[in-house]
């Protein structure tokens, strides 16, 4: 225990590894400790049935920040990087959406979609710029904070008077009203709404769902990719860059606590009892478990503790994995189209209705789904001729009224399968094996409090300046030597890497200042 | 439609039957919802009971919380700015302030370390939400017990003799800011050597349903020692003489203050001695360390003012011609025992150093007509009233 690291990173999620790689690249001695057997956090490939593998949590890549790839000199191996969305229809009249281009829309809707898409892209680009830097602190006289704030005001103003007003009008609004006003086609509205609510405890009528829509669009301008070999390929590439730059990564090393001495984080103790010391501790775990479990509130102040305690982070997304003998048939859909992502949300009210029970701790009887067949583009995932299905299923509230036990999980799994079966009647005959991960399962397997996609709800009151909580949005926590670098900090979740990169910049800047 | 009858009258403390019987003035006000008397017979006479014989004040409405559990010590230590771990053992009482994360005072109060892992916190204001928030992640139980316990302050030079008469053996060894448990008619009576008057005095704490027997026994024991019930008027006068703070007067509770710059840090209330930076963490530590480095905005001052016109709500100036306004008076009174015109106030730094002369703009009325004077005042360091008998152990018998 004589070595003292410059930085210890708790967790080898993609953000932890990006942060670690950048710190190592800057010449820092970095140790990354990961509880799981493999790196990647919620971005991993794992076998769920004999011979069948799947991206266990996150399955599509659409937000990864180009800046991250550039900084790390990383080229990724995509199985596909322009995946379309297919809004499924029971009648077989599906809608294929790729960016602003959609087959099967009325002329009016097509025109509207082009203008909607152009506007949203403009706003998403503006937003994206601010996802890649720490939000300015408010009410302080620091030059950089003031400059960033002024720049933000200027950038919004630069949109032009009309556009700026529209931006300010939309940013807190719900997507339901906006879509209803613009479009007729129910499938189109349903599918766009799903992009806004995926991973949240929000329905299309909830405020700030325009923001969540923009957020999703921001990273890669809405281009959706699939990693060859599943998400572990991404995570292994990140681990490799981190190691190549000199960082040490150790898996199967759960951290029990952050060691605090004399009001300073000075290292960590693992569950096995090993102690590692470092100048800074950086947590890729979510803010709640970092402060409540790893640090312990006695080492931080009450106002901060209360805010962290109150972070809303109850997950709603379940993950369905099916091992299939072969592809099922869907009326009106050719085999090639199975390589795209299918959306089950026949209209926008369907999405809102799916959300309703979640408010009261019950699952959706007719869930919203994003269904993929990744094996179609990636033969490594299933035995020859066989296939895997990977789907995100909403809503499955973490706080299920009767609690998540095997019966509740099986029941919701059946609901999910039945829902797909409405479109693919022969699906049940094809199923060899199946798995459903509820938010409770995700919490225990991936160590994410509440199993929440973003490590904390992505709404205006938990966004930018106040993410994870007011007064701590610059990655540095109010405990000397402690930083956050995960999805719970600015800007939020999804595989985008911005939090990890921004945190590394903040840590290096802090070191310089000290 | 019928409406259920709602009792809108104020709450009555367990001593109320005795208070009501003594009351000649009918000047009651609300103290956190309880009936509390301004005075019972005459404010002046009651004041002199504090300074010359023995005064009894019903402080049952004081907000009380019981803090218990394995983490209770760590909990109170993190809550307040002073060292509670090493310096306030079981059987001791501490005056303390607690701050928010910005280092601004939420309230001040007394913390009684009743037994190992068991504390009582007494304050002017209600604090359950904050105390509960401070308990997040700790093994402590916080319970409000304001109504469960009756409390009396017995203050004045004769207070020790009266407790001796009451038969509290060992009371002679009780030091300032100490507490002890006694048996009173089969019930636990807690006595602390504390008070709000700056004089020799005690506070007595007992189950609410034993309040009246305690009152009767106390008055019987004090019969020949000039024991007298007093109201808030007399207490307020002695509190200013002692230089003690009052919430909503010398400071606003930070969590109820809207405007920035209207709250005060412990440094700005003259409580530097209560802030212990040797503690690695407490609420407000980071902000207070920064304030210590960068300087405070306000300073708490005690003023000895010329003349005899009370300087209530007066502006404070650096110069006689009232060109430079530096602050204002928060509490003021004529001090009969010191024969001084005294006040507490808040002034902008760097003004108000001890020994400095400032000017107080006093308005006073004589036969309807108002006059204004610029009274010269000196900033003093010591409390106006702090007699040696306050800490003498054992105290003198009278
Ligand atoms: C069901 C579901 C589906 C999703 N689908 C997508 C998708 O398709 N596309 C997309 O972009 N995003 C998706 N997401 C979101 C995305 O997976 C997360 O936002 C992202 O993984 C967060 O990355 P991170 O590095 O910040 O944290 P994580 O990926 O959660 O990694 C944190 C790491 O820290 C480790 N850790 C925690 N505590 C400790 C400890 N005490 N000691 C040691 N290690 C510890 C964990 O084991 C984990 O490896 C999905 C999320 C869910 C829940």
Image (cartoon, coloured by chain):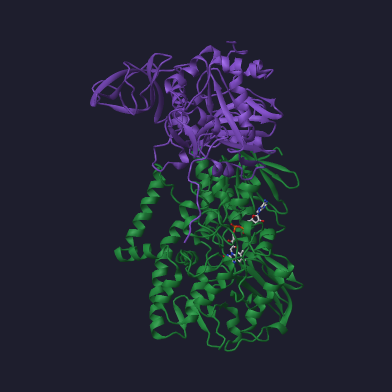
- Quadrant in which the C terminus of chain B appears: top right
Give residue A202's position: percent from left, percent from top: 52, 66
Pick the front one: A299 or A128: A299
Give residue B59's position: percent from left, percent from top: 54, 30
Pick the front one: A162 or B67: B67
Q: Residue at x 47, y 77 (%)?
A: A189
- Left or right: B7 with respect to A390? left
Q: Which chain is purple?
A: B
Give residue A378's position: percent from left, percent from top: 65, 75
Examine the rendering and report whether any part of residue B87 can be seen. Answer: no
Q: Residue at x 53, y 77 (%)?
A: A350
Pick the front one: B145 or A339: B145
Which quadrant of the structure image shows residue A354?
Answer: bottom right
Q: Which chain is green?
A: A
Q: Is residue B54 above or below residue B346?
A: above
Number of marks in picture: 0
- Left or right: B372 with respect to A93? left
Pick the front one: A166 or B268: B268
Examine the rendering and report whether any part of residue B392 can be seen. Answer: yes
Q: Is residue B316 above or below residue B118?
A: above
| View quadrant of ligand 1 | bottom right
Give residue A450's position: percent from left, percent from top: 62, 59
- Left or right: A494 with respect to A209? right
């Amino acid at each position: 225990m004589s070595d003292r690291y410059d930085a210890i990173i708790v967790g080898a999620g993609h953000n932890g590894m990006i942060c670690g790689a950048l710190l190592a690249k800057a010449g820092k001695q970095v140790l990354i400790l990961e509880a799981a057997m493999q790196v990647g956090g919620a971005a991993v490939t794992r076998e769920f049935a004999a011979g069948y593998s799947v991206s266990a949590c996150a399955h599509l890549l659409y937000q990864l920040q180009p800046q991250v790839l550039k900084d790390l000199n990383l080229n990724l191996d995509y199985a596909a990087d322009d995946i379309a969305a297919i809004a499924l229809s029971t009648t077989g009249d599906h809608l294929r959406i790729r960016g602003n281009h959609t087959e099967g829309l009325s002329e009016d809707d097509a025109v509207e979609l082009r203008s909607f898409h152009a506007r949203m892209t403009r706003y998403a680009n503006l937003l994206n710029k601010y996802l890649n830097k720490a939000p300015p602190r408010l009410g302080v006289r620091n030059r950089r904070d003031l400059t960033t704030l002024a720049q933000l005001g200027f950038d919004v103003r630069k949109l032009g008077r009309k556009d700026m007003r529209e931006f300010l009008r939309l940013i807190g609004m719900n997507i339901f009203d906006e879509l209803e006003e613009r479009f007729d086609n129910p499938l189109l509205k349903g599918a766009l709404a799903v992009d806004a609510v995926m991973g949240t405890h929000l329905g299309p009528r909830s405020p700030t769902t325009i923001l969540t829509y923009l957020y999703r669009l921001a990273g890669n301008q809405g281009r959706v990719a699939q990693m060859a070999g599943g998400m572990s390929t991404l995570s292994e590439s990140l681990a490799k860059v981190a190691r190549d730059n000199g960082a040490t990564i150790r898996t199967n090393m759960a951290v029990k606590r952050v060691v605090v001495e004399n009001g300073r984080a000075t290292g960590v103790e693992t569950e096995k009892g090993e102690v590692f010391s470092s100048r800074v501790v950086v947590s890729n775990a979510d803010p709640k478990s970092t402060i409540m479990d790893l640090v312990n509130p006695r080492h931080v102040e009450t106002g901060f503790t209360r805010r962290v305690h109150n972070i809303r982070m109850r997950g709603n997304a379940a993950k369905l994995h099916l091992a299939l003998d072969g592809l099922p048939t869907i009326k009106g859909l050719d085999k090639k189209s199975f390589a795209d992502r299918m959306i089950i949300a026949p209209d926008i009210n369907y999405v809102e209705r799916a959300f309703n029970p979640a408010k009261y701790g019950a699952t959706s009887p007719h869930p919203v789904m994003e269904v993929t067949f990744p094996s179609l583009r990636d033969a490594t995932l299933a035995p020859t001729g066989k296939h895997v299905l990977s789907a995100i299923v909403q809503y499955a509230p973490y706080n299920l009224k009767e609690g998540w036990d095997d019966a509740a999980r099986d029941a919701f799994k059946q609901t999910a399968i039945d829902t797909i079966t409405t479109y693919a009647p022969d699906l049940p005959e094809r199923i060899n094996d199946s798995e459903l991960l509820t938010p409770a399962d995700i919490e225990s397997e991936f160590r994410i409090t509440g199993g929440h996609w973003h490590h904390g709800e992505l709404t205006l009151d938990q966004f930018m300046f106040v993410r994870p909580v007011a007064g701590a949005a610059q990655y540095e926590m109010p405990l000397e030597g402690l930083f956050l670098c995960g999805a719970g900090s600015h800007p939020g979740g999804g595989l985008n890497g911005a939090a990890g990169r921004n945190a590394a910049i903040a840590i290096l800047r802090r070191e310089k200042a000290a | 439609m019928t409406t259920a009858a709602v009792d809108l009258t104020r709450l009555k403390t367990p001593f109320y039957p005795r208070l009501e019987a003594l009351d000649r003035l009918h000047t009651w006000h609300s103290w956190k919802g309880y009936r509390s008397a301004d005075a019972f017979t005459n404010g002046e006479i009651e004041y002199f009971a504090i300074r010359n014989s023995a005064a009894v004040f019903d402080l049952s409405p004081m907000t009380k919380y019981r803090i218990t559990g394995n983490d209770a010590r760590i909990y109170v230590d993190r809550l307040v700015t002073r060292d509670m771990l090493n310096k306030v053992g079981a059987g001791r009482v501490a005056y303390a302030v607690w701050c928010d994360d910005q280092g601004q005072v939420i309230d001040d109060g007394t913390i009684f370390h009743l037994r190992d892992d068991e504390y009582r916190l007494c304050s002017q204001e209600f604090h359950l939400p904050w105390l509960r928030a401070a308990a997040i992640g700790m093994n402590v139980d916080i319970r409000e017990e304001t109504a469960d316990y009756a409390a009396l302050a017995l203050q004045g030079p004769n207070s020790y003799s009266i407790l001796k008469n009451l038969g509290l053996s060992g009371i002679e060894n009780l030091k300032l800011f100490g507490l002890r448990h006694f048996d009173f008619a089969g019930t636990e009576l807690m006595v602390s050597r504390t008070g709000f008057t700056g004089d020799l005095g005690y506070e007595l704490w007992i189950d609410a349903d034993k309040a009246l027997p305690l009152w009767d026994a106390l008055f019987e024991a004090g019969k020949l020692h000039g024991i007298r019930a007093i109201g808030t008027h007399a207490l307020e006068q002695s509190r200013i003489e002692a230089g003690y703070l009052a919430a909503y007067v010398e400071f606003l509770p930070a969590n109820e203050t809207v405007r920035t710059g209207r709250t005060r840090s412990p440094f700005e209330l003259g409580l530097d001695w209560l802030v212990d930076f040797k503690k690695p963490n407490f609420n407000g530590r980071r902000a207070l360390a920064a304030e210590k480095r960068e300087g405070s905005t306000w300073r708490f001052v005690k003023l000895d003012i010329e003349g005899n016109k009370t300087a209530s709500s007066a502006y404070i100036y650096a110069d006689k011609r009232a060109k430079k306004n530096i602050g204002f008076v928060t509490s003021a009174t004529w001090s009969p025992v010191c024969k001084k015109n005294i006040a507490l106030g808040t002034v902008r730094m760097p003004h108000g150093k001890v020994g400095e002369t400032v000017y107080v703009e006093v308005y006073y009325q004589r036969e309807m007509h108002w006059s204004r004077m610029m009274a010269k005042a000196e900033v003093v360091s010591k409390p106006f009233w702090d007699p040696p008998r306050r800490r003498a152990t054992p105290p003198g018998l009278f």
